[in-house]
Image (tube, rainbow, N blue to C red):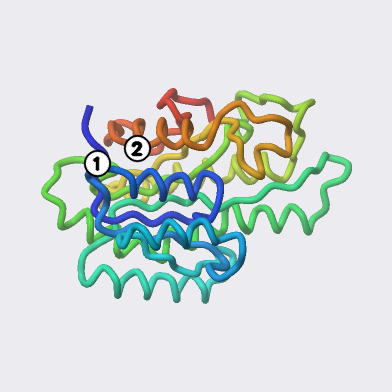
Amino acid sequence: MAALNPRSVLVTGSNRGIGFGFVRHLAGKSNRPEWIFATCRDPEGPRAQDLKDLAAKHPEIVIVPLDISDPSSIKTAEAIVTEQLKGVGLNLLFNNAGMSKPNTLESVTPEEMAEVYQTNVTGPMMVSQAFLPLLRKASQESPQKGMSCSKAAIVNISSHVGSITDIIGWHFVPAVAYRCSKAALNMLTRCQSLGFAEDEILCVAVHPGWVQTDMGNRLGQAAMTVDSSVQDILSTLSHLSEKDNGSFVNWEGKTLAF
């Protein structure tokens, strides 16, 4: 199995949950990235303390303020990352930040639908657009042939509940806005895979499992720990290639139905 060895990584929503797990695991690798850009909305807030403590121990972690629903915040973050990289590209982008609201077909409001869609779909779209030049640069300058997550990749953290073909847990978790947003994120991933194919930027949607995060535990006791999910996802990403471009997979690499 090939090793996951990107020189630079950016993670949105990195102050807690799966995003924090990505940052911690990447920083703990023997072949750790040279730059790990850990972004979150409020780096100075109490919810970012664990991230700040981790960054204090790992100089490769650069904390960057980023609100993925705010175009000006995205532009500022892109400028910070570009300056830090000093002329080289960005290898791996994790569109991880997301949100959910408990709602049903009867209770969901237009405002809730718009808010969830803005965070879970429009945000990843805008972030990917902003960092596309850096991803292209990484791909162009890489000696690797074909596609890989070490070369240039966009990884959109999705959910199995966004599958239109395989409707799971409907009676347990309607979460209408969340389901619709993740189905849309999956389509965005497919579009990105087609649009960025000539640039050899690998684009995939990943279901991390039912993970013990603030969001996951709202539904009961989640089945997987953050460490377990993140470790398996990073292992899966290490062997994805052009044959997987535009795919929807779970944490173990199993293909899921759109």
127 left or right of 224 in image = left
What x and y, as percent, mark residue 256?
A: 50, 26
Q: Give the Cα distance between marks 2 and 1.
A: 8 Å
Q: Nearer the viewer, residue 124 or 184?
A: 124
Element type where label 2 sits in the image: loop
The percent position of residue 80, horizontal first and vertical second, equals 37, 74
- Residue at x 59%, y 51% (from the top left corner): 98
| Quarter of the picture holding the C terminus | top right
Q: Mark 1 — residue? A: 147
Q: Nearer the viewer, residue 45 or 195?
A: 45
Q: Is residue 74 depicted above or below 192 in this figure?
A: below
Residue identifier under label 2: 245
**Any mark on residue 247, and which?**
none
Q: Is residue 44 toward the left or the right of residue 1 in the image?
A: right
Is residue 198 visible to the viewer in this orientation of the structure?
A: no
At label 2, counting other C-alpha atoms closer than 10 Å, the crowd grade (few under 14, some 14-19, many 20 or more) is many
The answer to whether any part of residue 113 appears in the image is yes
